[in-house]
């Protein structure tokens, strides 16, 4: 039997697979617009300009997205263990599904209004629903594989599968947007990944997706991207994960907690990045959708 740390490490390996819809094949997170508008040419080399963009983007994204990842993860993790009444969820009704769906919807709606441009919204919604589909079709255990795993799906897994299906249905019906950070929190909590590792992996994948986009834009070669990912990005991801690990949306704060919205709430810290991302659709030619 594997212990919890080995199980989490295995889940992280699965989620890091570049074949999964956790990368940037259709989204450059503003990098393409950044390059096309000439900001990359002001640096002495493509590797330096890319690292500068990754640093600025990572700092802004961590502050704006991690609070939503964290709140969604906490709510779903609590629902999975069926703790009942708590500071986040009230008394269970309809086995708690109505309560948890209401919470996830409110978190998602806040992210929608705090995302300042339609290009970022479009990409976030596209990637978010892809993660929900990934859980339903790629990670939930089908009956045919029970013989290999040696165990039947537990009640907790069944509850989570139903929750993900209900939330995805709300997205399909356009009752909720289904943004990437919220869906990532749902997915990683459903898979049993700890909040700390969920936050760290989300930031790593954001940075990796930027480097993948840079390779696709032919600004970097694949070897150069790997060098940057190992030597320059690692300390950036670690620093942002440590800085933002306690951030929350502020929607579900215990009244006894001393919550400072300015220091612990979500915020956008890179206005230039927002402007460039918003101008993506104005480019004469585009490789990415955002």
Image: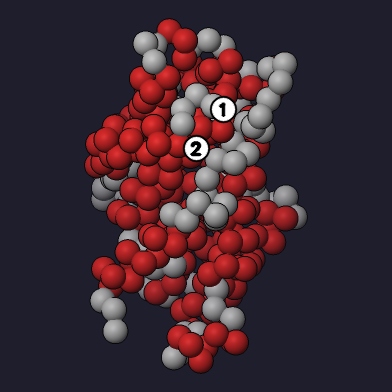
Mark 1 vs 2, N-terminal side = 2
* 287 on left or right of 217: right
Q: Which disc, if any, is residue 12?
A: none
Identify the residue position indicated by label 1 in the image.
Answer: 217
Q: Which disc, if any, is residue 212?
A: 2
Quarter containing the N terminus: bottom left
Of 245 and 123, nearer the camera is: 123
Image location of residue 12, percent across then percent down: 38, 60
Q: Residue furthest right?
A: 173
Identified at 30% across, 40% down, the residue is 230
Of 279 and 256, nearer the camera is: 279
Image location of residue 193, percent across then percent down: 37, 63
Q: Does residue 9 appear in this view? A: yes
Label 1, label 2: how far apart the Cα atoms are: 9 Å
- Which picture quadrant has residue 125? top right
Image location of residue 94, percent across then percent down: 58, 75
Relative to 68, does residue 170 appear above or below in the rendering? below
Q: Does residue 259 appear in this view? A: no
Identified at 68% across, 25% down, the residue is 286
User: Label 1's element?
Assistant: loop
Identified at 55% across, 54% down, the residue is 19
Relative to 255, does residue 213 appear above or below in the rendering? above
* 188 on left or right of 237: right
Identified at 28% across, 70% down, the residue is 6
């Amino acid at each position: 039997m594997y212990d919890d740390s080995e199980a989490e490490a295995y889940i992280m390996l699965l989620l890091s697979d570049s074949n999964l819809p956790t990368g940037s094949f259709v989204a450059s997170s503003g990098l393409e617009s950044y390059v096309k508008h000439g900001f990359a040419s002001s640096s002495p080399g493509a590797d330096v300009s890319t690292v500068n963009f990754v640093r600025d983007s990572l700092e802004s994204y961590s502050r704006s997205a991690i609070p939503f990842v964290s709140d969604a993860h906490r709510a779903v993790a609590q629902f999975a263990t069926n703790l009942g009444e708590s500071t986040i969820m009230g008394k269970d009704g309809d086995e708690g599904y109505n309560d948890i769906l209401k919470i996830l919807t409110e978190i998602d709606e806040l992210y929608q209004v705090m995302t300042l441009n339609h290009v970022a919204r479009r990409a976030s919604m596209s990637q978010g629903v892809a993660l929900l589909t990934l859980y339903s079709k790629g990670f939930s255990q089908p009956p045919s594989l029970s013989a290999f795993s040696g165990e039947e799906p537990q009640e907790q897994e069944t509850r989570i599968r139903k929750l993900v299906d209900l939330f995805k249905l709300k997205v399909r019906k356009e009752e909720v947007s289904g943004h990437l950070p919220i869906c990532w929190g749902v997915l990683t909590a459903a898979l049993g990944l700890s909040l700390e590792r969920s936050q760290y992996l989300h930031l790593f994948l954001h940075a990796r997706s930027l480097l993948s986009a840079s390779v696709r834009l032919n600004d970097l070669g694949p070897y150069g991207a790997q060098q940057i990912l190992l030597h320059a990005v690692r300390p950036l991801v670690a620093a942002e994960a440590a800085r933002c690990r306690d951030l929350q949306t502020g929607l579900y704060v215990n009244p006894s907690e001393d919550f400072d919205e300015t220091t612990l709430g979500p915020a956008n810290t890179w206005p230039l990045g927002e402007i460039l991302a918003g101008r993506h659709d104005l480019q004469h030619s585009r490789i990415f959708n955002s």
